[in-house]
Amino acid sequence: MRMRRRWAARIREKARKAHAPIGLYLGLSFVILVLFLFLPQFRTPLNLSNLLLRSIPLLAVAAGQTFVLIGAGIDLSVGSVISLSTCVASVTMEHNLILGIILTLASGMAVGLANGIGVTKLRINPFLMTLGTTIIVSGISLLIRPYPGGTIPQVFIDFMLGSVGGVPVICIVFFVVIAGVGIVVLRKSRYGRHLYATGGNLDAAKLAGVRINAVLIASYIISGFAAAFAGLYMTARITSGDPQTGSPFQMQSIAAAVLGGTALTGGRGGIFGTVIGVVILVMLGNVFNLLDINLYWQQVLRGLILILVVGFSQFRALTRSRTVLGASQSAQGTGERR
C-alpha cells in the first residue's frame, strides 16, 4: 500500500510538470505584435475570421493527437479518419441529419478503438498499427466516395460556420470548448493523471494500479472522436465529401502537438501548448499566403521552423536534465564524504 501511494504521488507530479516551454508563448506574442504592426492585411477582420475558421479542424485533431502522444503512442490514422468522416457524412446526412452526425462520430471512434486494441492487446507498434489503419480507412473512404461529392444540408453548414455580424461565433465556441475540455481532462481528472503516468513510465503506472490498457485504448478513441469531429467541420466547409481532404492533417496534428511541448516519448505535454502550436501553424500558412510565397517554399519553411523550434526545445530539456543530474551527483558525493 505504501508503494502504491508513492507511485500515485509520482503520477500527480508528472501531471503538474506537463506544460509547454514559456519561450514558445513569448515568441508567439512577439510574432503577433510584429504582424499587427508591419502587415496591414493580417489585422483585417476578414483575415482574422479566416484564421479562426482554419484553426478549428486542426485544433480538434491535434488535441486528440496530444492524448495519444502523452500516452507514448502516435496516431497516423487521423487524416484518413477526417476523410472518412466527410464521406460518411455526405452519404448519410441527406437522409437523416442527426443519424448522419452520430454515424460519422461513431466511425471515428470505431477506428480509434481498433487502433487501441491493436496497440494494447495485440502488442503492435503504434506507428505500424495506425499506419495500417490509415491504408484501410483510406480505401474505405474511396469505396464510399470515389471522388468529391454528395449533398450536405444547408442547416448543418449554417450552424457549423455560423456568424453574427461577421464574427464566427460558433467557431469561437468550438475553439473554447475543445481547448477547455482537453485542459480539464488532462489536468484535473483521474484519467489525465493516469495517462501521464502511463506515458512517462509504464512499469511505474502498473505498480500504482493504473489500468494501462484501458487508459491507452481510451486515448485512441478520443483521438478518433476528435478526428471525426474535425471531419464534420470540414464537411461543412467544403460542402461535400472528399476522400482526400484529411491528408494534410496527419503530420500537422503531430507538428502542432510537438511545437506545443508534447514529447514524442510520452509523459509530457498538454492541450494549452497544443493550442499555441495550432495558432503558430495556422498563422504561418496565412502569412505565407499574404506574402505570396511559393507553395513549395512554404513546405520547406514550415519544416525548417518545426525542426528549429523542436530542436531548441529538446536542447534545453537535455541541458536541464544534465544540470539536475550533476547537482544530484554533487550532493551525493558531499553526503558520502560526511
Image (tube, rainbow, N blue to C red):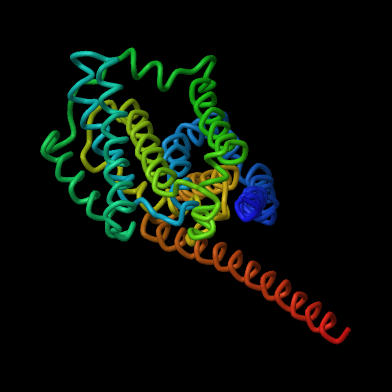
x and y percent of residue 303 in the render?
Answer: 45, 62
Quadrant housing the C terminus: bottom right
x and y percent of residue 298 in the render?
Answer: 42, 57
Q: Nearer the viewer, residue 234 or 40?
A: 234
In terms of image quadrants, where is residue 33? top right
Q: Nearer the viewer, residue 28 or 254?
A: 254
Q: Nearer the viewer, residue 204 or 160?
A: 204
Left or right of 131 on screen, residue 58 = right
Left or right of 147 on screen, residue 30 = right
68 relative to 145, above or below:
below
Residue 181 visible to an observer of this rendering = yes
In terms of image quadrants, where is residue 57? top left
Instruction: State the residue lying farthest toward the bottom.
Output: 337
63 relative to 241, above or below:
below
Instruction: State the residue lying farthest toward the front.
Output: 1
In the rendered picture of this protein, how many numbered marks are placed on residues? 0
Q: Name which residue lies at 81% across and 77% down.
A: 331
x and y percent of residue 304 in the render?
Answer: 48, 65
x and y percent of residue 107 in the render?
Answer: 26, 33
Q: Name which residue lies at 39% across and 56% down.
A: 294
Residue 31 visible to an observer of this rendering = no
